[in-house]
Image: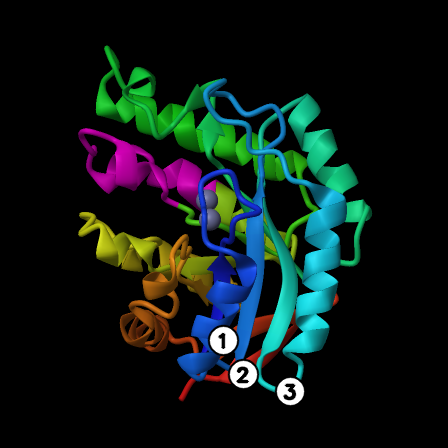
Amino acid sequence: MYDYHTHSDFSEDCSVPLETMIDQAVSLGLKGYAVTDHYDPDYCNPDYIFTLDFPAYHQALLETQHRYRSSINIAKGIELGVQLGGPMQKCREAVAGFPYDFVIGSIHCAEGYDIYLSDYYEGRAPEDVYRGFYAYMLECFKGFKDYDVVGHFNVIDRYAPAMPGSDAYMDIARQIMQVIVDDGKGIEINTSRDRQLLPRPTPTRELLQMYVDLGGETVTIGSDAHDTEIIGYGFREAKEMMLSAGLRYLAVFSERKVSYVKIS
Ligand SMILES: [Zn+2]
Ligand SMILES: [Zn+2]
C-alpha cells in the first residue's frame, strides 16, 4: 500500500508531528508514503495562513526519507493550493525551489472564496456554484502545470450544502479532465471522504471513469490524513474503484517521475 496524500504539523491545520505519522505508516506495513503538507499562498480566508516553513520542512523531508529508508519509501511531497494570479506564480517558485518527489495541485479557494465556508454558497443556485467552481478550476489547470496529480477533484461535493445533478457541470469537468490527460498528469482517489460519511466519493466513479476513458492512467490513492488513525483508510474500496474503472496499476512517484505498481 502507498498512501500518497498526508499531512503533519508542518501544515496549518494539523498538529501531529511528522515522525508520529510515519511511525504509524510503518506499523501499518505501508510500502510508500508521501508527505504532502499544505502550501496555499495568499489564502482566500484571512483566518488561516497556509504558509509553510520551507527550510525546516525541506530539512525534515530529507532527514526523514534517509532515516526511514530501510522500512518505508518516503516521497518528499507538497500539496499546493492553486489559485489564479499571484498565488499561482508563488506555487511555481515553491516547486522550483526544492527537489520534490511528488506534487499535488488542489483547489481550496475558488472565485476568491474559501470553499469550506458557507459564504461561497449563500444566495446562489447549486448549478451556478458548481459551474463557477469548475470554470475556475479549469482556468487554474490551463495555467498551472507544475504538479503531478490533481487533489480531491470534486472537493466541492464535500462542502456544498446542496448538489445539482451531475449534468449541470459535467461538460466543464470533462474539459478539466482533458487538460489533465493532455498534460500527462494524474488524479488521486482521496479516501478521506469515507470517514466523514460524505455523499460522493472523491472522485466519483463517473469522474474516475471519465479520466480513464479520456486516456488517463496515472492515479494515486491518498488518505489526506491529518491524524494517525486515518492513514491508509479506505484503500480497499479505492483499489476496487480503480479496478472497476479498468485500471490495473497504481501510480507512485520519485523525483517527479511516475512509475506504476500492479494493484494486488
Ligand atoms: Zn486539500
Ligand atoms: Zn490535504
Q: Which mark is residue 132?
A: none
Q: Eyeballing the image, is 22 above or below 134? A: below
Give the residue drawn at x 62%, y 71%.
74
Which mark's residue is nearer the viewer, 1 or 3?
3
Question: Hey, which quadrant is residue 115 in on the image?
Answer: top left
Q: Eyeballing the image, is 113 above or below 6? A: above
Question: Hey, which quadrant is residue 223 in on the image?
Answer: bottom left
Mark 1 or mark 2, which has the lower sequence index?
A: 1
Q: Which residue is mark 3?
A: 70
Q: Amino acid at mark 3?
A: Ser
Q: Which residue is mark 2?
A: 261
Region of the chain picked out in magenta, as a range = 154-175
Mark 2 or mark 3, which has the lower sequence index?
A: 3
- The reply to whether residue 177 is visible in this rendering is yes
- The reply to whether residue 254 is visible in this rendering is no
Q: Is residue 13 magenta?
A: no
The quarter of the rendered structure image containing the C terminus is: bottom left
**Left or right, 79 with reference to 198:** right
Q: Amino acid at mark 2?
A: Val
Tell me if mark 2 has few (under 14), some (14-19) or many (20+) residues whose alpha carbon lies within 10 angstroms of its own. Answer: few
**Left or right, 3 with reference to 38:** left
Q: Amino acid at mark 1?
A: Leu
How far across and down, in percent of the image, does residue 256 sit?
71, 63
Mark 1 or mark 3, which has the lower sequence index?
A: 3
Depth check: 36 or 8 in front? Answer: 8
Q: Which residue is mark 1?
A: 250
Instruction: Give how far apart the Cα atoms at labels 1 and 2 are.
Output: 5 Å
- Residue furthest right as drawn: 97
Depth check: 222 or 129 in front? Answer: 222
Instruction: Give how far apart the Cα atoms at labels 2 and 3 are.
Output: 19 Å
Looking at the image, do the residues carrying marks 1 and 2 touch, with CB atoms under 8 Å apart?
yes
How far across and down, in percent of the image, does residue 158 sit?
28, 40
